[in-house]
Image (tube, rainbow, N blue to C red):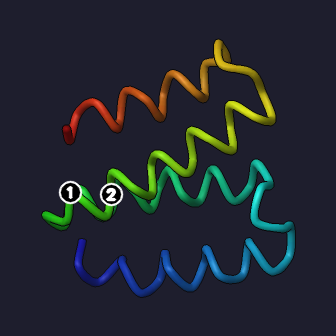
Amino acid sequence: SMLAIPLIEKSLEITEARFGKDNLQVAATLDTMGNVYAGAGRPEEAKNILQRAIKIRTQQLGAHHPLVANTKFSLAAII
């Protein structure tokens, strides 16, 4: 998991540059990134990352969308 962190950070940087900071592709990357951080034993960072993904997905898809629920489930697993 520790080896994945630099790769997912680079992926986020590229995705934000290509699509903008509030794009659903960015939210998908953040969702993955939050889970990677949680798996690496970095729950505070994971929490912040997943909360950002939830915010983007809620704004773009609405609060009741399955992807919002999925990210909330990931967040609940680390709180």
Task: Assign the C terminus to one quadrant of the image.
Answer: top left
Q: Residue at x 45, y 57 (%)?
A: 49
Q: Quadrant of residue 26?
A: bottom right
Identify residue for label 1.
43
Q: Residue furthest right?
A: 19
Could you tell me which residue is drawn at 31 percent across and 64 percent down?
45
15 or 1, which is in the foreground? 15
Where does label 2 land, which residue?
Answer: 46
The spot of residue 3 in percent (x, y) is 29, 84
Q: Which mark is residue 73?
A: none
Circles 2 and 1: CB atoms closer than 8 Å: yes
Can you give x and y, in whole percent of width and height, for residue 31 in the image?
50, 50
59 on left or right of 48: right
Looking at the image, the residue that sits furthest to the top is 64
Disc 2 marks a residue whose amino acid type is Ala
The Cα atoms of the two marked residues, 2 and 1, are separated by: 5 Å
Q: Is residue 35 above or below residue 13?
A: above
Q: Please tell me whether residue 42 is drawn above or below residue 7 in the rendered image.
A: above
Q: Is residue 28 above or below residue 36?
A: above
Query: At which x and y percent is residue 75?
Result: 34, 37
Callout 1 amino acid: Pro
Tell me which corner region of the image, top left, top right, bottom left or bottom right, holds residue 41.
Answer: bottom left
- Where residue 32 appears, as percent x and y from the top left, is 47, 55
From the viewer's perspective, tell me whether residue 70 is left or right of residue 24.
left
- Other-residue count near label 1 (Cα within 10 Å), few / some / many at <14 / 14–19 / ≥20: some
- Residue at image position (80%, 80%) is 17
